[in-house]
Image (cartoon, rainbow, N blue to C red):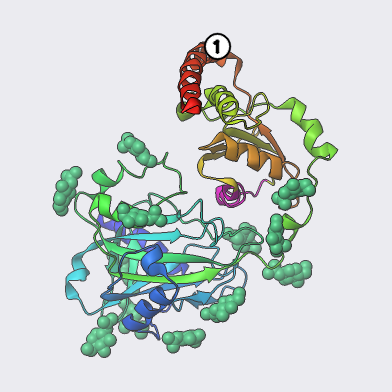
Amino acid sequence: MLAQLLAVAAVAVSCVSAQNSTNFTISDVTSAFTAAKIVPDVLPAFNPTGILNVVFLDNTTGASVNVTPGENLTREQNALRPQVFLTTNDTSFAQQTFVLAMVDPDAPTPQTPTAAQIRHLLAPGIQANGSLAAGAALVNNTPAISDFLRPTPPAGSDPHRYILLLFVQPANFTTVASQFVNASTPISNFNISLFAEQVGLGSPIAGNFFLTGPDANSTATNGTNTTGTASGSAAAASSTSPANAPSSSLGRAELSWVGAAVAAMLFGTKLPPGANRILFVKNLNYQITGEDLYDLFGRYGSIRQIRIGNDQKSRGTAFVVFDDVMDAKNALDHLNGFHLQERYIVVLYHMPAKQDAAAAKAEIARREEELAQLKKKHDITDED
Ligand SMILES: *[C@@H]1O[C@H](CO)[C@@H](O)[C@H](O)[C@H]1NC(C)=O
Ligand SMILES: *[C@@H]1O[C@H](CO)[C@@H](O)[C@H](O)[C@H]1NC(C)=O
Ligand SMILES: *[C@@H]1O[C@H](CO)[C@@H](O)[C@H](O)[C@H]1NC(C)=O
Ligand SMILES: *[C@@H]1O[C@H](CO)[C@@H](O)[C@H](O)[C@H]1NC(C)=O
Ligand SMILES: *[C@@H]1O[C@H](CO)[C@@H](O)[C@H](O)[C@H]1NC(C)=O
Ligand SMILES: *[C@@H]1O[C@H](CO)[C@@H](O)[C@H](O)[C@H]1NC(C)=O
Ligand SMILES: *[C@@H]1O[C@H](CO)[C@@H](O)[C@H](O)[C@H]1NC(C)=O
Ligand SMILES: *[C@@H]1O[C@H](CO)[C@@H](O)[C@H](O)[C@H]1NC(C)=O
Ligand SMILES: *[C@@H]1O[C@H](CO)[C@@H](O)[C@H](O)[C@H]1NC(C)=O
Ligand SMILES: *[C@@H]1O[C@H](CO)[C@@H](O)[C@H](O)[C@H]1NC(C)=O
Ligand SMILES: *[C@@H]1O[C@H](CO)[C@@H](O)[C@H](O)[C@H]1NC(C)=O
Ligand SMILES: *[C@@H]1O[C@H](CO)[C@@H](O)[C@H](O)[C@H]1NC(C)=O
């Protein structure tokens, strides 16, 4: 067991021969958090007792980058999971286990953060190795709940704030946390303060943050727009489902176009037949990440789930599930034929599988009944 721990730690330390020294104080950190409105946007208050030194290894130059709170970093600089160090005079922290989190409260844009927060890292089981007074390396000896996701703010967005926070881990954390965040929990619409409350993390004891904007060269993702051209609409006739269609949580969602039709009748909105909350996206760049898609589609509303095809058959495709069918429609209207990472993407409504047809029929009958009742109510209201 100890040998195992040592091995993990040795790997973590040898990957990045980082420096554990900083040139800023705790009060520099709190001032920077306040100036950047992280208090109150993300934390109700922030009274750290330690300094979190975050050290990235630039993936292209190999240079190490010690993060000064609030500094601008490029996407190359922060492509890889950083090494972190804790400097504190509080000796009680030497025997503690910590939880390290990183969140983006500005997705898809700081002006309309409808997908925020994005959970970029949630790692429990972190321990200090070395002298806390001099800056001890924080080493993880358990797998992360959410693995590090590199910042990828969308083209056209102002820089996002990426915030790292260190909490003391309560003894029952593992059991309690899995009720709130597990493998099936979307990384979007996370709330670190709420999560901290739910699992008893208390206030962070240290933190740091940096800003990252879109790639200087990523304007292509925003530049060309071929909505309505052959590449977009011709393909719309042939929606197919890849092998890994969203299933478990989506059985009901697949029926939601019926509900959408009801909404359209009631509120006078126009939804095409087959419109539903689930979009099927084709012709994606194989390098696309879940966050790229959250960033783009999240501009149109709250996203429930994104699933990217990862096998031979489904590569280059994804499902994007919105909470609201009108947002899905809006996203489809704007993004079909959009140029994203050198490909013109095709966006279609997901077509419910045949085996769901019977269920859909039953659902239609139920909804029609519901509609009749709603209409009755509606009419009465009109007369008031
Ligand atoms: C602590 O860090 C030293 C290097 O400074 C390394 O040799 C050792 O394996 C680490 N121990 C643990 C438990 O992480
Ligand atoms: C720390 O050093 C970096 C680069 O050496 C500098 O950009 C930054 O302003 C310094 N921070 C403080 C608080 O002095
Ligand atoms: C970060 O970059 C923006 C421009 O994108 C600039 O206005 C700002 O002053 C920079 N901040 C720092 C701390 O260098
Ligand atoms: C890091 O650089 C290598 C070599 O250039 C590249 O293959 C890899 O994709 C890069 N990783 C990230 C996360 O950018
Ligand atoms: C630790 O205490 C020393 C001496 O009082 C002080 O200079 C230093 O800023 C403190 N460091 C931290 C991280 O609180
Ligand atoms: C950095 O960490 C090492 C090992 O934990 C320690 O010996 C050293 O004093 C620390 N501080 C600096 C400035 O290197
Ligand atoms: C991206 O497009 C939006 C409008 O769709 C525009 O406001 C923004 O300036 C564009 N950004 C870039 C970098 O071209
Ligand atoms: C977890 O531990 C805390 C005290 O550390 C306690 O207040 C809380 O009720 C515990 N939660 C569960 C689910 O056991
Ligand atoms: C997993 O997390 C979700 C919240 O995203 C929660 O609703 C669900 O109950 C959790 N699952 C388990 C087994 O605790
Ligand atoms: C996050 O949760 C906290 C605590 O419940 C709440 O006060 C805050 O408004 C929430 N933040 C957002 C952005 O929803
Ligand atoms: C942007 O493109 C130019 C020309 O292709 C290249 O020299 C430069 O390194 C690129 N910059 C980034 C940040 O990728
Ligand atoms: C693409 O062009 C169409 C038609 O000109 C426009 O309605 C839509 O907003 C554009 N999409 C984006 C993402 O800019």
> Which of the two residues, 328 or 237, is positioned nearer the viewer here?
328
Query: Quarter of the image holding residue 242?
Result: top right
Question: Residue, x 41% and y 68% (percent of image)?
Answer: 38
* Residue 92 lies in the magenta stretch: no
User: What residue is shown with label 1?
Assistant: 361
* Residue 293 lies in the magenta stretch: yes
Question: Residue, x 37% and y 51% (percent of image)?
Answer: 143
Question: Residue, x 44% and y 70% (percent of image)?
Answer: 209
> Which of the two residues, 384 or 190, is positioned nearer the viewer here?
384
> Horizontal and vertical percent for residue 26?
32, 80
**Residue 61 located left or right of residue 130:** right
Examine the residues drawn in magenta and state their main secondary structure.
helix
Query: Quarter of the image holding residue 186?
Result: top left
Residue 319 makes an appearance in the image = no
* Amino acid beneath label 1: Lys
Helix or strand or loop: what does disc 1 sit on? helix
| Rendered position, 48 above or below 175 | below
Q: Which residues are magenta?
A: 286-299
